[in-house]
Each structure stands twice: as structure tokens, then as C-alpha cells.
Image (cartoon, grey):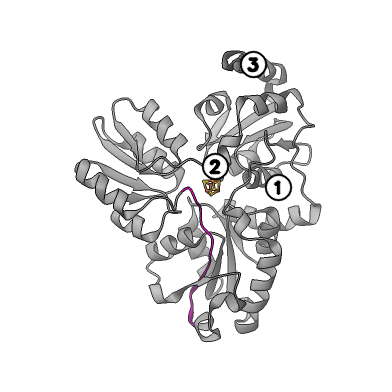
Amino acid sequence: METIELIQKIKKRKKELGERLVILTHHYQRKDIVDLGDFCGDSFALSAKAAKDKNAQYIVFCGVHFMAESAAILAKSNQIVQIPDSDAGCWMADMADSVMLDKAWKEITKVVSQSKIIPIVYMNSDAHIKAHCGRNNGVICTSSNAPESFEWAFDRGEKIFFFPDEHLGRNTGNTLGIPKNEMIVWDPAKPFGGNSQDSIIKAKVILWKGYCLVHTRFTTEQVEQMKKMYPDAKIVVHPECTEDVVSVSDAVGSTSFIVNYVNDAPAGSTIIIGTEINLVKRLGAEHRDKTIMPLKNSLCPNMFKINLENLLYTLENIGVANVIGIRNSIKEDSKLALNRMLTL
Ligand code: SF4
């Protein structure tokens, strides 16, 4: 089917479903999909939207699987959440599973009293991991509210166990002025994460050794080269980038922060962005009066799995195709941690 025909069919199906349907799209989706959605945002904004929505019977989530899961956890019991391609996973989320986490938690709590350690899980994780966090008095965070979640945790305990993104955790710790020698890395492949018991006792923040392949492709060399070529440009990067890249950039923040940064920049500005390429391209198209460039073309193939064909298929099989199902006990425990996040 031609693109035009697919778009027409999707619009027709949307019209038929009316208020019973809401299509949520993540900022990293291709433009065709964002244009057909009802609401575009980062994972925090989309979860908040899913939690507030009262009318829609069907929530079609154009993003990756963990995001659709979060929407399903927060949705009401009469709402059905679907994802156009259930294989749209996330490399980072796959770097921590419940077996690895249970082992790590047992090892850490052998050394440190459980009451002193607060788990914080990044939104980019599966529901079992979020449930662990809910059961153990922890909170979920996104790149929009990671500093607030750290402050929340330090009001309740002495240490943070942060997973699965080492870089977001370290950049957040740096923002809050936590000394570098008080942040240690937990390598799940090694006993005690590769740490001595003494270093676990002394650490303020324990960072799971996980990363995003899209954001760790950016390097300090690319930043230096762009600064030479465009001396007046501002360089803005996402906090999933390494701390080295963050340290040589002009600003760091979540996808929503980046969107607002571009919106607020005066006409004629040049902004070079270190995040997923579809967002950078869209910002360039929406701000013709500014020069918007990627630090490097870095595409998330998982986000790119959502396309017009599978969106149409989902709408034609509403309530049936690729429905996100989560066990009730997992749902309840992860909801605790997600709701704590929404109140931050
Ligand atoms: Fe996962 Fe990175 Fe893709 Fe986000 S950009 S979905 S963290 S792989």
C-alpha cells in the first residue's frame, strides 16, 4: 500500500473510533507516526497522560515495549493498551532482568542494611524490575525527573541503587555534587558487582552497568569537531550520554528539555543535538528559522519498528492485536513505584 493510502486508512479508522481511541507517540518516532498521534511526549509525559486519560477505551502506544507497559500499569481496568509492534524492545531495558536484579539485591543487602538503601529504577526497564522497586520502597524515574528522584531517595535512606543506566545515574550524581569516589559501578556479571564489600559500604550511589547504544555513540571528539566548525553553536545532549560528552556540551537534559531548549532559542540560533535522529530531524523541520543539526546520525532501530503498516494493523484489530498484558501482582507493585514518581 502507498504511504498516502495508509495515512488515509489510519485517519478513517481514527475517525470511526473517535474518543474511544488515543494514540500516544514518543518523541523518537518518525514524523509520519507523530503526525497521526493525539499526543507526543517523552516517557514521563506519556505515562502521566496515560494515567490521566479517562475517556479512551483503547490506548495505542507508538514507542518501545517498556513504555507501553508503563501505560498499561497506569491505565484504568477498562482500558486496553496496544503497541503496533510487540518486538519493539529496548537494548538498555534488556540489560537488567529480574533474576540478575534479585541476585544483586541479595548481595548488596548482605553488606548494607535494606533500610539504608533505596532502589531507583529508570523508566527504561521491564515491569518485573519496576515491581521490585515498588516492593522495596523505591521509585521510578525518567530523564526529566532523575535529580528529584535522587533527592527523594536521600530523604529516605543513605544509599541509592540505580539501574539500568549507568550514565544517567552518574550524570545525575554529578549534577547533585556527589563525589565521584562515592559512585561505584555494579557489573551484574561479577560477584558483588565486581566491588569489594568495603567499597559497597562507602558508596552513596551504586550504578548498574547498563547503557543506551543510541546515546553512547556520541563522543567528545564529535563535540570538539562541531565546536570548531560552528563556534557560535550550542551543543545540547541527553543525559544517557557519557559524562565526558556531557562535560564538553553546553546543556544536558531529557527529550522534553531538548524540545523546549530549541523552542526557546532565538531565531538564527544554531543548535547541535546529541539524541535520537528522528527527534533532531523533526525539530529541524519545525524550526526553519534556526539551524538544527545532529551531533551524529544515531537512530534507535527499536523505535523505528513502529510504522504506518503496523499502526494500521493495530487500529484494524483494536482491542485484540499486540495487547500489553501484565500479571496483577507485578502490576500492583510496579504501580506503587510509578505513582511515587508521578507525585515527585
Ligand atoms: Fe532504549 Fe536507547 Fe532506544 Fe531509548 S533510544 S528505546 S534507551 S535503545
Q: Earlier in the sequence, mark 1 or mark 2?
A: 2
Camera-side residue of 48 and 310: 310
Q: Earlier in the sequence, mark 2 or mark 3?
A: 3
Q: Nearer the viewer, mark 2 or mark 3?
A: 3
Q: Position of residue 227 (x, y in %)?
A: 23, 46
Q: CA distance from mark 2 to mark 3?
A: 33 Å
Specify whether residue 43 is in view.
Answer: yes
In the figure, residue 104 lies in which quadrant?
A: bottom right
Q: For mark 1, give the secondary structure.
A: helix
Q: Position of residue 264 (x, y in %)?
A: 33, 36
Give the left or right position of residue 229, taking residue 282 as reference: left
Residue 196 higher or lower than 91, as above or below: below
Q: For mark 2, give the secondary structure.
A: helix
In reply to whether residue 167 is colored magenta, the answer given is no
Residue 218 higher or lower than 156, as above or below: above
Camera-side residue of 216 and 61: 216
Magenta span of residues: 202-214
Mark 1 = which residue?
73
> What secondary structure do most residues of the magenta stretch adopt?
loop
Give the left or right position of residue 129, taking residue 173 as reference: right
Residue at point 49%, 57% (across, down): 146
Q: Position of residue 23 (x, y in %)?
A: 63, 30
Q: Position of residue 8 (x, y in %)?
A: 62, 14
- Quarter holding the N terminus is top right
Camera-side residue of 125 and 225: 225
Residue 9 higher or lower than 214, as above or below: above
Specify whether residue 116 is in view.
Answer: no
Mark 3 = which residue?
1
Q: CA distance from mark 1 to mark 2?
A: 15 Å
Mark 2 = which residue?
45
Q: Is mark 1 within 8 Å of ligand 1?
A: no
